Image (spheres, rainbow, N blue to C red):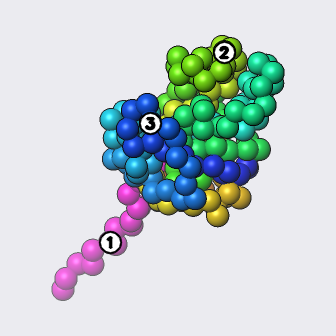
Amino acid sequence: MTGRLIGIARRNVRRAPMQTTDQGLITQVAGLVGDFKGAKYPRRQVTVLALEAWQAALAEIAQSSLPWTTRRANLLVEGVDLPRAAGGVLRIGAVHLEVTGQTYPCSRMEEAQAGLLSALAKDWRGGVTCRVLKVGRSPWAMRSRFWCGRRPQRAICPDSPCIKRPPRTRRAAKKPEN
């Protein structure tokens, strides 16, 4: 499946408002650099929200004006069904993210809008949590380079640490010395 990355957001401290940005560096140590959660929670380094799931949750509570950053996710994508199981891989440009689970909405959602917590809790609408498999920049310009599915095969991402294998070499037969 292909889709588009349409938003990047982060916050530098707990409970701070989300700040949108045009690009971000994603690392295996910090997740989205500048977001406080990536380094602290290695299985939740980056969170990804699907626009369609966000819109479905807003429609359920008859609310259309809440910005996607209310959900407090790092990346907003559209046009793709996010994997609904751990082990799925999302590729956004050079970045490869492994889904570690569902993002469960917290009480902050209810503080933002009555009913939002329960609307997001259904059908993985809150998005997915991910750990970083392969690092890189996630610029806004890479919106058209989004892929998701099971762990990719070698032909799709030969440099990914999840599938890197040592190269096969043939041993040359030793010639006897005369």
Does residue 131 show up? no
Read off the residue under disc 3: 16
The foreground one among 6 and 92 is 6
- Marks 3 and 1, how far apart at CA: 65 Å
Q: Quadrant of residue 166?
A: bottom left
Residue at 34% x, 72% y is 172
The foreground one among 10 and 98 is 10
Answer left or right for 71 relative to 159.
Answer: right
Q: Regarding mark 1 in the picture, which secondary structure is present there?
A: loop
**Mark 3 near mark 1, Cβ–Cβ under 8 Å?**
no
* Badge number at residue 62: none
Q: Residue furthest left?
A: 178
Q: Earlier in the sequence, mark 3 or mark 1?
A: 3
Task: Characterize the local packing of mark 3: few (<14), some (14-19) or many (20 or more) Cα atoms within 10 angstroms.
Answer: few
| Residue extent of the magenta highlight | 163-178
Read off the residue under disc 1: 173
Whether the magenta-drawn stretch holds residue 167 is answered as: yes
Read off the residue under disc 2: 114
Q: Amino acid at mark 2?
A: Ala
Task: Characterize the local packing of mark 1: few (<14), some (14-19) or many (20 or more) Cα atoms within 10 angstroms.
Answer: few
Q: Amino acid at mark 3?
A: Ala
Q: Nearer the viewer, mark 2 or mark 1?
A: 2
Q: Quadrant of the C terminus?
A: bottom left
Residue at 60% x, 24% y is 112
Q: Is residue 155 above or below residue 34?
A: below
Which percent across, then down, holds residue 105?
56, 21
Q: Regarding mark 2 in the picture, which secondary structure is present there?
A: loop
